């Protein structure tokens, strides 16, 4: 699990001001963790599905890739 300080980019909030969608990124290792329906997706790389996350990132206009898949 990533222990570095993560940068938060908020994509959308609900009417209470709570984060609904956002993106956490790690400046040191370039990992990213989408927040969907208010829940950060912070699983280890091997349990993540880049193909499931890509449409979300595309909708946000974010260019990102998991470190495990960048060399493929
Ligand atoms: Zn990191």
Image (cartoon, rainbow, N blue to C red):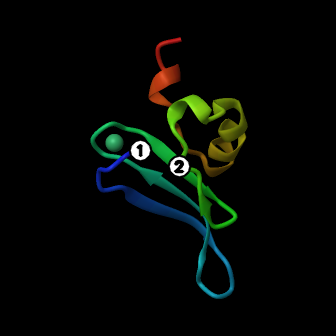
Q: How far across and how far down the image is residue 49, in percent?
A: 66, 33
Residues at marks 2 and 1, CA–CA distance in whole angstroms: 8 Å
Identify the residue shown where x is 62% and y is 51%: 60
Location of the N terminus by quadrant is top left
Relative to 1, is 29 on the left or the right?
left
Q: How far across and how far down the image is residue 32, in percent?
A: 47, 44
Task: Name the residue beneath numbered marker 1.
Answer: 1
Q: Are marks 2 and 1 in contact (CB under 8 Å)?
A: yes
Relative to 32, is 2 on the left or the right?
left
Q: Is mark 1 within 8 Å of ligand 1?
A: no
Does label 2 or label 1 sit earlier along the sequence? Answer: 1
Q: Camera-side residue: 57 or 3?
A: 3
Task: Name the residue beneath numbered marker 2.
Answer: 42
Count how many numbered circles sit on residues in the image: 2
Up/down of 10 relative to 62, above or below: below
Q: How far across and how far down the image is residue 46, in percent?
A: 56, 29
Q: Quadrant of ligand 1?
A: top left
Identify the residue shown where x is 27% and y is 41%: 28
Q: Is mark 2 within 8 Å of ligand 1?
A: no
Q: Residues within 10 Å of mark 2 (few under 14, many from 20)?
A: some
- Please tell me the numbered disc located at residue 62: none
Q: Does dot 2 land on a helix, a strand or a loop?
A: loop
Q: Residues within 10 Å of mark 1 (few under 14, many from 20)?
A: few
**Viewer can see residue 27:** yes
Up/down of 60 relative to 18, above or below: above
Residue extending furthest toward the bottom: 16
**Viewer can see residue 65:** no
Identify the residue shown where x is 60% and y is 46%: 61
Q: Does dot 1 land on a helix, a strand or a loop?
A: loop
Identify the residue shown where x is 69% and y is 48%: 59
Up/down of 35 relative to 43, above or below: below
Q: Camera-side residue: 5 or 12?
A: 5
């Amino acid at each position: 699990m990533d222990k570095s300080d993560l940068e938060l980019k908020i994509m959308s909030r609900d009417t209470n001001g709570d984060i609904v969608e956002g993106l956490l990124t790690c400046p040191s290792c370039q990992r990213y963790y989408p927040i969907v329906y208010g829940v950060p997706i912070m699983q280890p790389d091997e349990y993540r599905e880049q193909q499931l996350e890509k449409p979300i990132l595309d909708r946000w206009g974010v260019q990102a890739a998991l470190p495990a898949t960048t060399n493929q």
